[in-house]
Image: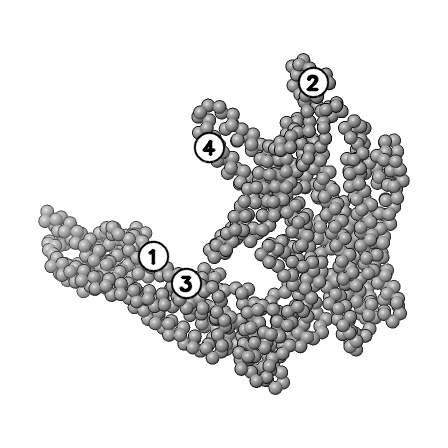
Amino acid sequence: MVFRSEEMCLAQLFLQSGSEYDCISELGELGLVEFRDLNPSVSSFQRRFVSEIKRCEEMERILGYLLREIQKTLIAVPEEDESPLAPPPRQVLEIMEQLQRLEMELSEVARNKEKLQRNLLELTEYTHMLKITRTFIHSRSRHEALGPQYEEFPTMETDSVSGCTGMQRLGAKLGFVSGLIQRVKVEAFERMLWRVCKGYTILSYAEVDENLTDLDTGEISKSVVFLISFWGDQIGQKVQKICDCYHCHLYPHPENDEERADVLDSLRTRIQDLNNVLHRTEEYLRQVLQKASESAFSWVVQVKKMKAIYHILNLCSFDVTNKCLIAEVWCPVSDLANLRGALEEGARKGDATVPSFVNRIPSSDTPPTLLRTNKFTSGFQSIVEAYGVGDYREVSPAPYTIITFPFLFAVMFGDLGHGIVMSLFALWMVLTEKQQKKKRSSNEIWETFFSGRYIILMMGIFSIYTGLIYNDCFSKSLNIFGSAWSVKAMFTNQQWTNKTLQTNSLLTLDPNVTGVFTGPYPFGIDPIWNLAVNRLSFLNSYKMKMSVVIGVIHMSFGVVLSIFNHLHFQQKFNVYLLFLPELLFLLCLFGYLVFMIVYKWLAFGARDSSQAPSILIHFINMFVMQGKDLAPLYPGQTGLQIFLIVIAMLSVPVMLLGKPLYLYWLYRGGKGLRRRRGYERVRRVSEDDTSAAASYEDDDEEEGLDETPGREALPKEFDFGDVLLYQSIHTIEFCLGCISNTASYLRLWALSLAHAQLSEVLWGMVMRLGLRMTTRVGVVFLVPVFGLFAVLTVSILLVMEGLSAFLHALRLHWVEFQNKFYHGTGVKFLPFDFSLLPSVFEQDGLL
């Protein structure tokens, strides 16, 4: 972790033809540079390496098909410990051919398998149809044995009609249609037959016992076997059309039982043969996929790297001879040596006769911001960058956030027991982080907790500390060092008697009585306050004043950090015209409030505490110039307060007019020959006060880069109104913000009080009920009570209250602390790094 972003430079890479691919590959492995697009006006489809990118996309398509087939067969894709390097260009065609052959083989096997499965399903359906329709025919024959049902048909022998088109005729034209239909369509199918055929059909159907797979959709559903008897050819054509409309699977109906038995025997044989062939096909397919899965991860990584390399090559431009590629990159100055080494290694791998080299070039563009982090600091850096990426070379709040963020959280969350539980949870995540990373959970909530495991650990540790300060552990106090208050002294000095105990429900310990109060508790709050009736009033006063003290110190520290930006960017006028007025305004008003709080703590003891004046009344009278009738807090208070008010009020016009007038004077001819350079430097800062561009260009000026003719051009027109308007907004925001931000820190007191009260209520309403039972049954009853207490503690006090305190601590850092010195309008440095490239297959869950 560094206190400001790293120094960056703009460099040109001259990549010789034949080795450019290997050079970019080396840079992608190291992740040193961020490439700039030198062809912004050229369409993506008109760039030089678009055909290579299309080839990579075709390989990605094949790999996607391969991974989906592997996933269907539940074969795990083994991942290599080390990521394979990008293949050289001469091996690209070999990989392409391997993938195409594999795709053709898999497609052929998959088609054969699908065809076999379809045939097997058709034969299975045909078998069910023959078995079930036989019951329909036998049932109908029994009815006919009792006598004919219709006069038009004197007899209905087993001389039936089979199939859907070829009908046998018995007297009038009688035909049969048999097949299967989905269960959900039966009712609609039956109504349609009745309405269209006007009763000239007889429909018999029965449900198949086992679930069958639909041949078209592949879904498993219930099917129904039906048999339709109809009159005449015209009715038969209508029945056929209705069956087609409802996607029925029609099968020929046998003419007699002998034919039915023969068909069933042949179906059994064919089904057995198909099962054997299908099993061998699946086994062969699994062997092919198993072998392909061993290389699938390498192919995916290699194709991803190849595509990324060609994409970067499309950002480069060619020189006039078309023999050299020119690229522009942002690179940390500290990595220039590694950049040159990567180009030399790439030229060696590419067998280039002319080496590639790097040339540092000047630039007026604002460089991107790079802040190096590790697994511990990355979480805190993410908190800062959620507000905004810092400007180039701007002071970073992240190093200070490591301490202040968990501390402010702990002030609101202070409880020894809850802090221990939170620390243990975070410590478990830290100790098992390698195993958790390998699992790659898709649970977004878990990933959020895991990525912030070190933040949670620090918050838990600080909560343990503040819990000891508050002497609060699951709403109970710990008597570690022994209370400094003594009840015995009240009896010894005849302040209390037995009659006092009998006649008073509440008793007050008087610290002025000798021996009652022997001194402050060694660490934190005395445990006797947990028994006091006025405990809440005491803690309210203590935590409210503590919140104001912490808030003013935190904001003052933010203002002090701004001076490092002013000095680094060589803007000394901001030190006198912005930093000093802001610091004086804050300290003369709210710093004085902190002084009064501390002075009152030190000046008034137990004997004269009743005469202690109200700090709030004195602070209000300080502004309205009243309060002469009140007893002063200290000698000379009125004169000092008037002096501080005058200093604070004089700071406002300095903040408002100082910078605009100085810039106006500088533009009109101040500092003689330095007018152009000096004004040109400060004007860029005054436009948006980001200080980023000025920093980079000032560094260039120090190196002599400003001696170019362009640097001595006349400055642009100065708009005093714009600068004054911006400074007016800043002044109003700062002055009003000091008041509102100080009040905003009272959330530390409010949330700390709420957390303590919720913890006390939970103990009193749940745990105390179980502890009150003194019988043997109470031991058994205590187990579910403790379980309920643990669940409510974790869900309400740890998760909900913890999230609330986290969000409030986040707001205090973003609004009250960072806006004093941190602009957060920069651009993050995004290096070309293979390990940072997203994979479409991981996003789709194929890897």
Q: Upstream in the sequence, badge 3 or badge 2?
A: 3
The residue under label 1 is: 219
Q: Upstream in the sequence, badge 4 or badge 2?
A: 2
Question: Between marks 4 and 3, how big is the CA–CA gap?
Answer: 46 Å
Q: Residue 815 or 847: which is nearer the viewer?
A: 847
Question: Between marks 4 and 1, how big is the CA–CA gap?
Answer: 49 Å
The residue under label 3 is: 77
- In the image, 324: left or right of 770? right
Secondary structure type for disc 2: helix
Q: Upstream in the sequence, badge 4 or badge 3?
A: 3
Q: Is residue 43 visible?
A: no
Please rate how many residues cluster around mark 2, counting C-alpha atoms within 10 Å: few if below 14, some from 14 to 19, many from 20.
few
Secondary structure type for disc 4: helix
Mark 2 residue type: Phe
Whether label 4 touches label 1, CB < 8 Å:
no
Dot label at residue 491: 2
